[in-house]
Amino acid sequence: MSLEVSNLDVHYGRTHALRGASLSVAAGETVGLIGETGSGKSTLARAVVGLVRPSAGRVTVAGEDVTGYRGRRWRALRRRGLVQYVFQDPLRSLDPDLTVEESIVEPLLIQGRPRRAAAERARELAARVHLDEALLSRLPGELSGGQRQRVTVARALITEPRVVILDEPVSALDAATRVRALEFFKQLRASGTALLFISHDLGSVAGIADRIAVLYQGEIVETGPARTIVNAAEHPYTRLLVGSAPTLRSAAADRAEREELRALLQTIGGPA
Ligand SMILES: Nc1ncnc2c1ncn2[C@@H]1O[C@H](COP(=O)(O)OP(=O)(O)OP(=O)(O)O)[C@@H](O)[C@H]1O
């Protein structure tokens, strides 16, 4: 497995944000992680890249147990670029004073690669994410949201990571750009990259993920092939998500059934 998360627990003070979460992503596989706001999706991603420290559990990246890594070892792992996390908000994750090209090449320069070879790779990557070469000399503030997002993806891919975590990668995009971005992410699979695709929207994930994991109040309540999750989910919360995704069900989706599922969720309650 390229990424393996086992029984992960994360606390923020008294908030128990992740409760025994386990999931795995194989090379060339796309796994969708869905759940409503506050369910712990970003926390899981941050724990994988060492930005928050789990209180229990294990994270393995490309067979390397990184759970006990601290400071220097994490920085060394990041420099190798085995795992890349593309943050939700591209404007905040890009340095406003660096041009697009400088942002994309930076991870390679940090690795000590020659500038000219890095610039060549940046051009290849820009073409791969359908970013016009003329934009390479611009600053992030001079780009559209969709263009900025492609810059962050190009920057993440330049180190040829084994694992890429995309946090809500299409939620800020308009419909046409979203379709193109999803197509691009699908192609990434062919290069053997393991993709963890985080979204609150089951509709965005269903068409791209091989498997889907459903996070509810810090717990992964269901994992399965995308088709099974959409057509034959077992957990009431997953069924509620399927029922609420307009692209998955007709507008005539049975409101009474949703009310029933909500009531059921209330009776079984969240994790104590
Ligand atoms: N730095 C923090 N300090 C304290 N609590 C936090 C912190 N970050 C997140 N939390 C809490 O942990 C829980 C999980 O948050 P998280 O950001 O992982 O959810 P999410 O599913 O990614 O939500 P969203 O879709 O809104 O990004 C929430 O209750 C949140 O308030």
Image: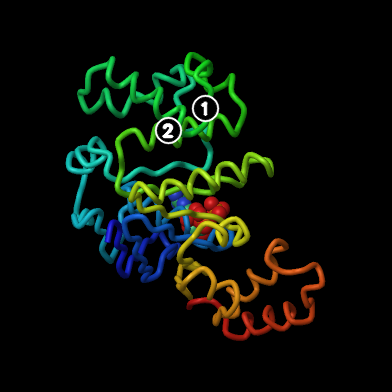
Identify the residue at image location x=63%, y=39%. Answer: 177
Q: Looking at the rendered structure, which numbered label has been put on residue 154?
A: 2
Question: Left or right of 245: which side holds 223?
Answer: left
Q: Nearer the viewer, mark 1 or mark 2?
A: 1
**Residue 205, quarter of the rendered image:** bottom right
Q: Secondary structure at mark 1?
A: loop
Q: Looking at the rendered structure, which numbered label has been put on residue 11?
A: none
The N terminus sits in image quarter: bottom left
Q: Are marks 1 and 2 in contact (CB under 8 Å)?
A: yes
Q: Is residue 263 above or below residue 60?
A: below
**Residue 12, quarter of the rendered image:** bottom left
Q: Is residue 41 above or below residue 239?
A: above
Identify the residue at image location x=42%, y=33%. Answer: 154
Q: How many marks?
A: 2
Q: Looking at this view, is 215 or 146 the one in front?
A: 146
Q: Which residue is mark 1?
A: 131
Question: Left or right of 111: which side holds 142?
Answer: right
Identify the residue at image location x=28%, y=39%. Answer: 81
> Which amino acid type corresponds to the residue marked 1 in the rendered image?
Leu
Q: Looking at this view, is 72 or 124 the one in front?
A: 124
